[in-house]
Image (cartoon, grey):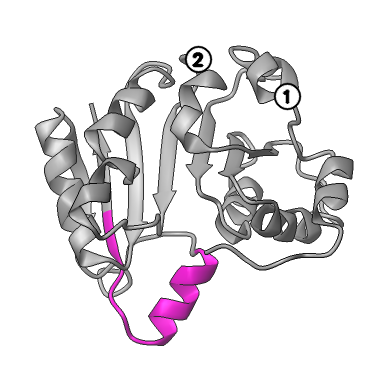
Amino acid sequence: MRLKNVKGAKEIIEKSDYIIKNPEEIKGSYDKIFKNENDIHIEIGMGKGDFIIEMAQKYPNINFIGIEMFDSVIVRAVQKLENLKLQNLKLIRFDATNIEKIFEKEITTIYLNFSDPWPKNRHEHRRLTSEIFLKRYDKIFKENNHIIQKTDNRKLFEFSVISYTNYGYKIKAISLNLHEDDFDSVETEYEKKYVSQGLPIYMIEVYK
């Protein structure tokens, strides 16, 4: 969800060492940014960063990149990182519609957490699990495609399951109530709120 006016957001973002300011120029060379050849996992629509930050802390031998298009949102993640020194985490302010412009066959896993469901049928092409986006992801995966998605929106979840299977993905894991099924999963800020309200979290992990 887009936050309203955060004073000095642009300046805070520009000063952060976590921000990659010229991702189009880095395309194909993220191993040089991280100074290693470890797997790279990205979260598209990282929000305020709870998930990607905790993942980077939990898995130091994996490189993580959080992608968010709004200054007013990504600045919250930057603020949370002020007193942390995570060598395996970078952030990019970018619109995922052009995701293939900043990566080239170098991503191992994509996380889609509580993405905008775009509920109207005429907007289904904007959903991050539509065929249009799945084709874009083909261009950035290093070898095998691997996507892990979580959402509170059942209609988006159902749409995504159909979209994945129609596109040739196989289901590795699936849950209609993630926390009831006791999966080991790092929570996002939205997830914590929804769980506290007793709402089910839908999860699917696919590969091809």
Extreme-bottom residue of the structure: 197
The residue to which callout 1 is attached is 22
Residue 20 against residue 66 in the figure, above or below: above
Q: Are marks 2 and 1 in contact (CB under 8 Å)?
A: no
Say whether residue 208 is left or right of residue 62: left
State the image quarter where residue 102 is shown. top right
Say whether residue 112 is left or right of residue 131: right
Circle 2 sits in a helix, a strand or a loop, which is it?
loop
**In this rendering, does residue 189 appear at all?**
yes
Q: Nearer the viewer, residue 53 or 124?
A: 124
Quadrant (top left/top right/bottom left/bottom right) for the C terminus: top left
> Which of the numbered marks, if any, corresponds to residue 104?
2
Residue 200 against residue 22 in the figure, above or below: below
State the image quarter where residue 21 is shown. top right
Rendering coords of residue 120 (x, y %): 23, 58
Mark 2: give few (<14), some (14-19) or many (20+) Cα within 10 Å.
Answer: some
Which residue shows up at 72% across the image and 15% down it? 32
Amino acid found under the numbered disc labelled 1 = Asn
Q: Nearer the viewer, residue 98 or 208?
A: 98
Rendering coords of residue 34 (x, y %): 71, 25
| Range drawn in magenta | 188-203
189 drawn magenta: yes
What's the CA distance linking mark 2 and mark 1? 15 Å
Label 2 vs 1, first from the N-terminus: 1
| Mark in the foreground, 2 or 1 | 1
Say whether residue 139 is left or right of residue 188: left
Mark 1: give few (<14), some (14-19) or many (20+) Cα within 10 Å.
Answer: few
